[in-house]
Amino acid sequence: EVQLVQSGAEVKKPGESLKISCQASGYRFTSYWIGWVRQMPGKGLEWMGVMYPGDLDTRYSPSFEGQVTISVDESITTAYLQWNGLKASDTAMYYCARTSGTILEDAFYIWGQGTMVTVSS
Amino acid sequence: DIVMTQSPDSLAVSLGERATINCRSSQSVLYSANTKNYLAWYQQKPGQPPKLLIYWASARQSGVPDRFSGGGSGTDFTLTISSLQAEDVAVYYCQQYYYFPFTFGPGTRVDLK
């Protein structure tokens, strides 16, 4: 069964660093784009960026470029989303999601369960 | 960025009745070389992640009931639920994946009347 399992909820203070994870299973990790979507409380979905683990090609939405870092560890089939210097406005649910294959221009077919990040002093 | 708009913001439909959601993109998402519309629909129930319903504007994802259908081309698209069931209460989002960054619509909430 294809699955994306995300790490648990986090509570952080402004300025702190954070790395959340998304462990993939049930498919060849290097053959599908994997990305991240933000959902602020009570709001809609925002496409943040994607990475192709096969060659580490990474694309960010301009809205998130420089604000977060997407990475993967192929050896443990896990994708990461990282912040250096959290802000209160980073408080949101973050979903990882996977495309259907090697093409960048694609919908997200498989989703993780979400990781809630709360940033508060 | 491509702006996706949806209408209505919300709608209430009786059990067994039809629900229609509209989605418009600020530029055409039809690629003439392959005649595909780069448009997807997702369903999000409270407390759950989004679920892909429709891709390429009209292709139903495996396991999605056939009461869900997608249509349209270019800049104007629709998601139709032919006979609303209680389990269809959710927020529905369209997304274009033609122009980078790939953008979502603001969502349409569907409730029971």
Image (cartoon, grey):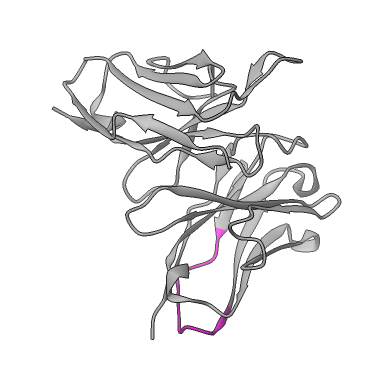
x and y percentages locating residue A3 in the rendered image: 59, 47
Q: Residue furthest right?
A: A55
Q: Residue at x 66, y 17 (%)?
A: B36
x and y percentages locating residue B4 in the rendered image: 47, 35
B70, A99: nearer the viewer? B70
> In screen coordinates, is B2 left or right of B47?
right
Q: Residue at x 48, y 76 (%)?
A: A87
The quarter of the image holding the N terminus of chain A is top right
Q: Is residue A79 magenta?
A: no
The magenta-colored residue range is: A6-17
How many marks the image carries: the answer is 0
A93, A74: nearer the viewer? A93
Q: Residue furthest left?
A: B113
x and y percentages locating residue B98 in the rendered image: 65, 32
Q: Quadrant of residue A93?
A: bottom left
Q: Residue at x 53, y 16 (%)?
A: B58
> In screen coordinates, is A97 left or right of B25?
right
Q: Is residue A18 above or below residue A58?
A: below
Q: Is residue B4 above or below residue B23?
A: below
Q: Is residue A92 above or below residue A11?
A: above
Q: Is residue A8 magenta?
A: yes
Q: Is residue B26 above or below residue A99?
A: above
x and y percentages locating residue B100 in the rendered image: 66, 41
> In screen coordinates, is A12 left or right of B14?
right
Q: Residue at x 38, y 86 (%)?
A: A121
